[in-house]
């Protein structure tokens, strides 16, 4: 059973290229006849699951880097991770919006602040 994305997880807007000189926006028709520029629930769910999975994996990575480099501060390590995510997105290896990247970092910090450095996923990435 899928976990419902939390309210603070950003929702993507539809991306499209529309030709012409007149200003346009892309939208999809809803079942009630209205329109929405937001991605469907399934895409939102998938984006959330990917972001949550990455945050969980990064807990193990961050803790390992802290053990290997005791002179690094947590803030320094977090910045390195943030820069690494941006580079993976820039090189098109990962597909996260800027808002999703920020959410991942907030989630990572929250997981690291929990006892034992997060949930059980932390050990899986070591």
Image (cartoon, rainbow, N blue to C red):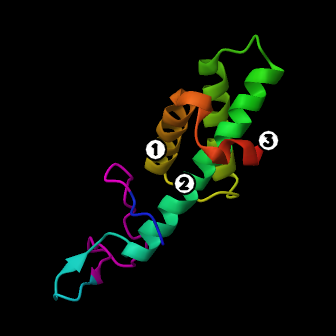
Residue bounds of the magenta highlight? 6-28
Q: Secondary structure at mark 2?
A: helix
Q: Which mark is residue 103?
A: 1
Residue 76 horizontal side relative to residue 111, left or right? right
Q: Position of residue 52 (x, y in %)?
A: 54, 53
Q: Position of residue 18 (x, y in %)?
A: 39, 77
The image shows residue 74, relative to residue 55, as above or below, that is above
Q: Secondary structure at mark 3?
A: loop
Residue at position x 39%, y 79% from top? 19
Q: Main secondary structure of the magenta part?
A: loop
What is the CA distance from the residue labelled 2 to the residue labelled 3? 18 Å
What is the CA distance from the residue labelled 1 to the residue labelled 3? 22 Å
First in sequence: mark 2 vs mark 1: 2
Q: Position of residue 97 (x, y in %)?
A: 49, 53
The image shows residue 15, relative to residue 121, as above or below, that is below
Quadrant in which residue 58 is drawn = top right
Quadrant in which residue 6 is drawn = bottom left
In reply to whether residue 99 is colored magenta, the answer given is: no
Q: Which mark is residue 51?
A: 2
Q: Secondary structure at mark 1?
A: helix
Residue 48 horizontal side relative to residue 124, left or right? left
């Amino acid at each position: 059973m899928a976990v419902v994305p939390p309210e603070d997880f950003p929702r993507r807007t539809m991306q499209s290229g529309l030709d012409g000189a007149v200003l346009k926006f892309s939208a999809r028709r809803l079942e009630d006849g209205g329109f929405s520029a937001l991605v469907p629930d399934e895409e939102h769910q998938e984006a959330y699951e990917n972001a949550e999975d990455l945050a969980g994996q990064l807990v193990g990575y961050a803790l390992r880097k802290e053990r290997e480099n005791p002179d690094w501060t947590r803030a320094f390590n977090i910045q390195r991770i943030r820069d690494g995510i941006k580079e993976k997105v820039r090189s098109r290896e990962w597909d996260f919006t800027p808002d999703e990247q920020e959410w991942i970092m907030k989630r990572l910090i929250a997981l690291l602040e929990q006892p034992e450095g997060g949930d059980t996923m932390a050990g899986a990435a070591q």
